């Protein structure tokens, strides 16, 4: 008596699972548009920069554009041209190279030379310790 309800519910469960599997197999897969290898590299390089970063773009047609990076999407990105202050949209395949200038404009972008002081201080301390050791041994 207890095996019959178990068998009926198992069969119903198996039928529901098969129907769901059939619907899942027949549904089209949602995938992002595929980019070629170069376009993917450009996308990943641009993704490292924050919005508003000043960049120099070298386009595939050998022209250049200077300006600020806007928003990124799956196939294109926005870029504010520094010369005309207009918003342009480029696809990743339109870009040949991305350059950043060493000079930055704005508050808080001053060069930090403190990183050079640490090795200089360590070298000076090592030379001083060596000189003191030499004098004591002599």
Image (cartoon, rainbow, N blue to C red):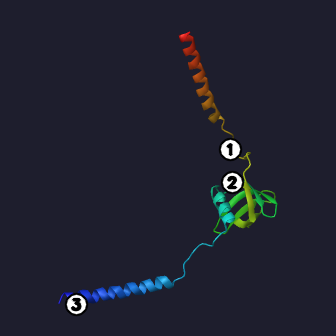
Q: Give the class, few, some or many, for how many residues have Cα within 10 Å of label 2's Cα (few <14, many ≥20).
A: some
Looking at the image, residue 10 sits to the left or right of residue 131; the answer is: left
Q: Which residue is mark 2?
A: 53
Rounded to the nearest angstrom, the CA distance separating label 2 from label 3 is 69 Å
| Of the two numbered discs 2 and 3 in the rendering, the one whose residue sits closer to the viewer | 3
Q: Residue 21 in the image: x percent, y percent?
A: 43, 83
Tell me, yes or no, whether the two marked residues, 1 and 2, touch with CB atoms within 8 Å.
Answer: no
- Residue 44: image quadrant is bottom right
At 62% from the left edge and 35% from the top edge, which residue is drawn?
A: 115
Which of the image's four quarters has the C terminus?
A: top right
Q: Nearer the viewer, residue 128 or 68?
A: 128
Residue 91 visible, this orientation: no
Mark 3: give few (<14), some (14-19) or many (20+) Cα within 10 Å: few
In-image side of 86 versus 28 (left or right): right
Residue holding disc 3: 4
* x then y, percent, for residue 117: 63, 31
Q: Which residue is mark 1?
A: 109
Task: Tell me residue 48's x, y (percent).
Answer: 63, 55
Q: Which numbered dot is residue 44? A: none
Question: How far is disc 1 from disc 3 in space, using C-alphas?
Answer: 77 Å
Q: Residue 56 is drawn in which quadrant?
A: bottom right
């Amino acid at each position: 008596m207890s095996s019959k309800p178990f068998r009926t519910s198992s069969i119903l469960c198996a039928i529901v699972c098969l129907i769901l599997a059939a619907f899942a197999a027949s549904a089209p897969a949602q995938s992002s548009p595929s980019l070629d290898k170069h376009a993917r590299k450009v996308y990943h390089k641009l993704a490292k920069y924050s919005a508003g970063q000043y960049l120099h773009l070298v386009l595939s047609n050998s022209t250049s554009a200077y300006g600020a990076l806007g928003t990124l999407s799956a196939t294109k990105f926005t870029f504010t041209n520094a010369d005309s202050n207009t918003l342009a949209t480029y696809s990743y395949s339109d870009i040949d190279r991305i350059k950043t200038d060493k000079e930055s404009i704005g508050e808080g972008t001053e060069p930090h030379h403190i990183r050079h002081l640490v090795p200089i201080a360590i070298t000076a301390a090592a030379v001083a310790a060596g000189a003191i050791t030499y004098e004591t041994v002599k």
